[in-house]
Image: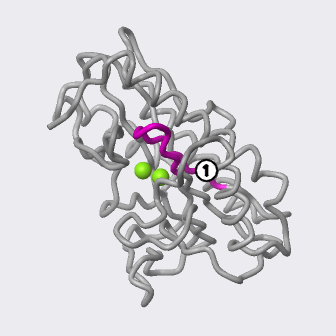
Amino acid sequence: MITIKSNREIELLRIAGNIVHETRMYLIPFIKEGITTKELDTLAEDFIRSKGATPSFKGLNGFPATICASINEEVVHGIPDDRHLKNGDIISIDIGACYKGYHGDSAWTFAVGDVSPKKEELMLHTKESLFEGLKQVKPGNRIGDVSHAIEEHAKKYNLGVVRELVGHGVGTSVHEEPDVPNYGKEHTGPILKEGMCLAIEPMLTLGRRDICILDNDWTIVTEDNSPAAHYEHTIVVTKDGYEILTGGIDG
Ligand code: MG
Ligand code: MG
């Protein structure tokens, strides 16, 4: 069932989303060559708890950490560990926070030092595809309109669109109905209505779209080892468009 949120619920979702955004902003100065993803995870968890919230992902289906930290060919669900970030890496950091029972969910991809022009382009066009999808969010449009806009933008730049993982509704659970795929046909799927809360999250690759899962049973990587980028915002559908709950165009 796709739920329509009340004004009171939207206010709590706004607070949760803002905590996610603030956590990302807090982490940015630390995302540098030499730091480990485990250190970033500890910083994020302490920050989220200092705001009176809890990490949404920790313990979710057994996930062991606060953030997902996915480096280079890792698409999503990278588990923070003792690896040090290196110059030239790209890292996507996915953050979830729960405030008074309501969640925010947002991911962003960052360059560590100087990255190749190809990786720069991948990041730029993946971010653009998120906002191309968002342009389609308004009451009366359908999920397929969002999906199609993301896919078309990715195709324009010959990027692979990961299909097995999708965006989703957000509320008292971090993953609710409906699914929001990053590919699809216009004028198909559920109709968007004011008060729906959605996480929209394109995951694009510099190579083929095929993925596989590592032996840790969590981390998704590209099968051809090409780099991947991931951008995600939680939004609420408004009377004539949408409101981003987890930041803005720059993160
Ligand atoms: Mg996420
Ligand atoms: Mg999500």
Provide residue 127's location: percent of width, then percent of height: 58, 43
Q: Is residue 101 magenta?
A: yes
Looking at the figure, which quarter contains the C terminus?
top right
Direction from residue 181 to residue 126 in the image, left or right: right
Mark 1: amino acid: Trp
* Nearer the observer, 38 or 143: 38
Residue at screen point 62% across, 71% down: 72
Q: Is residue 207 magenta?
A: no
How many dots with numbers?
Answer: 1
Provide residue 25's location: percent of width, then percent of height: 74, 43
Provide residue 143's location: percent of width, then percent of height: 26, 34
* Nearer the observer, 190 or 196: 196
Secondary element at tag 1: strand
Looking at the figure, which quarter contains the N terminus?
top left
Provide residue 75's location: percent of width, then percent of height: 50, 67
Residue at screen point 48% across, 41% down: 104
Q: Which stretch appears magenta? A: 96-109
- The vertical placement of 22 against 231, above or below, is above
Residue at screen point 64% across, 58% down: 45
- The vertical placement of 195 against 78, above or below, is above
- The vertical placement of 142 against 89, above or below, is above
Picture quadrant where residue 138 is located: top left
Residue 114 visible (yes or no)? no
* Nearer the observer, 238 or 222: 238
Residue at screen point 48% across, 58% down: 204
Residue at which label 1 appears = 108
